[in-house]
């Protein structure tokens, strides 16, 4: 936890917070903070600064906070991701938040198992928790938005052409002839398929909606690896 993320109900006054639970335990066991120590804090969807510990025990942590700077700039990228396996989803969502991605759309695809959509890891509570973990890691405060689309064809035909407007729209595809671009200087919409990739009919639909298939070379990567790889290459 490189930043302690604060929310409205943490504030007992305009400049003092009281924390318990996971954040308290982290400060005690990892930071090993004592009264007078300063920790990096940030208000959810707000500014970053420091919190000076005024009280800490086994039940609560109190800090006086001063928020004096803006969070890092958001990445100009919308990530459209075929729903990963449940055990992978948490890692991908936390990683995306760490990278500064602020809009994620989880979509269906032919190779996405129907059971994935019933996973408790898709609950709003779990997704929010993964976002928070990613933001704490990256010293960011702005929570991403996440949307789900169960019907591939309806999304690609009705929504995607509007969503990609004004952006460079790309879809990662192992058989693509065009290499992934580097150092892109414009907003990007990036579509990433399931492990095994999109089927040919899905690629054709994505192309019709304005997405250019791109390749990252001969290596076949897992979803949790390809997301940061492509982000690093594009930006």
Image (cartoon, grey):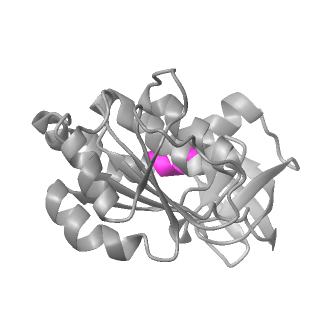
Residue 80 placement, left or right of 219: left
Q: Which x, y percent locates residue 70?
A: 76, 70
Describe residue 200's horizontal placement relative to residue 184 as left or right.
Answer: left
Q: What residue is rendered at 30% in x and 56% in y?
A: 206
Residue 85: quarter of image? top left
Depth check: give the residue in front, 57 or 195.
195
Observer able to see residue 130: yes
Is residue 83 highlighted in magenta? Answer: no
**Residue 131 colored in magenta in the image:** yes
- Where does the magenta region start and end? 130-134
* Residue drawn at the location 23% of the way across and 47% of the way down: 202
- Dominant secondary structure of the residues highlighted in magenta in the image: helix
Q: Is residue 150 above or below residue 93?
A: below
Residue 21 at what x, y percent from top left? 51, 43
- In the image, taking residue 167 as reference, residue 67 lies left or right, namely right
Q: Image quadrant of residue 115?
A: top left
Residue 207: x percent and y percent? 33, 57
* Residue at image location 73% in from the left, 57% down from the top: 41
Please say whether residue 59 is visible from this viewpoint.
no
Q: How many marks?
A: 0
């Amino acid at each position: 936890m490189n930043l302690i993320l604060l929310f409205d109900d943490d504030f007992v006054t305009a400049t003092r917070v009281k924390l318990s639970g996971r954040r308290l335990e982290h400060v005690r066991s990892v930071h090993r903070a004592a009264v007078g120590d300063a920790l990096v804090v940030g208000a959810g969807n707000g500014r970053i600064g420091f919190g000076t510990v005024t009280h800490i025990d086994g039940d609560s942590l109190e800090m006086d906070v001063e928020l004096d700077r803006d969070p890092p700039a958001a990445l100009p990228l919308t990530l459209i991701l075929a729903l990963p396996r449940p055990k992978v989803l948490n890692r991908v969502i936390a990683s995306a938040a760490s990278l500064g991605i602020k809009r994620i759309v989880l979509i269906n695809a032919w190779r996405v198992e129907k059971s994935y959509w019933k996973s408790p890891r898709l609950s709003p509570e779990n997704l929010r928790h993964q976002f928070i973990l990613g933001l704490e890691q990256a010293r960011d405060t702005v929570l991403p938005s996440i949307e789900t689309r169960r019907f591939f064809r309806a999304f690609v035909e009705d929504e995607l052409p509007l969503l990609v407007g004004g952006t460079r729209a790309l879809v990662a595809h192992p058989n693509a002839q065009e290499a992934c671009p580097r150092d892109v200087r414009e907003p990007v919409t990036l579509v990433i398929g399931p492990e095994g990739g999109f089927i040919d009919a899905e690629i054709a639909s994505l192309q019709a909606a304005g997405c250019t298939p791109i390749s990252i070379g001969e290596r076949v990567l897992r979803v949790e690896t390809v997301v940061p790889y492509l982000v690093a290459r594009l930006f």
